[in-house]
Image (cartoon, rainbow, N blue to C red):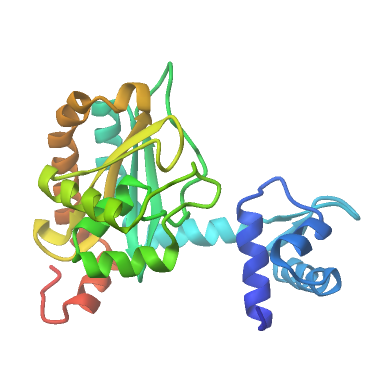
Amino acid sequence: MSSVLEKALAIVELLVEHPGGLPVSTISARIDQPISGVHRTLHELIRLGYVRQLQDGGDYALSIKLPALGLGFLGRAGITDVAQPILDRLAAASGELIRLSVIDGRKLTWVAVAQGATRGLRYDPGQEQGVVAHLATSAGGRAWLASMSDEAALELVGAQGFARDGGPEQSLGVTDLLTILKQTRERGYAVAINTYLLGMAAMAVTVRYHGDGPVLGCLSIAGPAVRMAPEQRMEELAPQLRAAADELGYAASGSQYFASTVKALHPARKTV
């Protein structure tokens, strides 16, 4: 890590994971940079309004500026306006957590969520918007990987890793992943049970522009494994999940972000 920008972004990305703040010594250790340099960068970020110090000599935390910018972008790009009503309806119908992830270059990032479980046991991480999905262990990641060739899928997973940092220990290898992708294509939706997070099960499908166009992202249903994992439960939810993904794919033309994504992937394709 050499540039000033890289150092600043490393601090910002770390503080995103710790909304309660961190002391400068911890930040320094986590990003492997000298305390003196981290201290200077933090105060520059404070001057620019992206970081705040909770009290004199206290921990450092992100201000509301960066989250506000992110929400503003999602709104102006038309992502939340297009997606949220569809996610809310699917959440109410399924009674589980619904998540939309979008493709951003070679990554898949969660951008919107709706919770359908109003009581009892439920899965609700509350911190995944803006998080890059781990492709090999998440249902959304597996759905996206299954939409491409095995070679392309292995290239993406090889760059990110077969196991998720902080996730359950995995013994997933190349052969295992290829088997999972084959099963996903045959089944029509991806499944992840106790692989991304112990006790959690999820299913996901891709969202394609106008139903048969480029893959824009993935839509998933997630919940406690004791409720979601039975095969019959997922089979019951699959038609609703596919219908919502299709609706998102057709509604995507109302989003500047999705329209520009399609134009970049397929310049000759009309986006309206």
* Closer-to-camera residue (45/7): 7
Residue at point 75% right, 66% down?
A: 46
228 displayed left or right of 231: right
Residue at point 67% right, 56% down?
A: 63
User: Residue 213 is drawn in which quadrant?
Assistant: bottom left
x and y percent of residue 241 in the render? 19, 39
The outermost residue toward the right is 57
**Residue 81 shows in the view:** no
x and y percent of residue 30 in the render? 71, 60
x and y percent of residue 44 in the render? 76, 73
x and y percent of residue 68 in the render? 54, 57
Give the answer, above or below, for where 97 lies relative to 209. Answer: above
Residue at point 58% right, 61% down?
A: 66
Considering the image in quadrants, where does the N terminus appear?
Answer: bottom right
Considering the image in quadrants, where does the C terminus appear?
Answer: bottom left
User: Residue 51 is drawn in which quadrant?
Assistant: bottom right
User: Residue 216 is drawn in which quadrant?
Assistant: bottom left
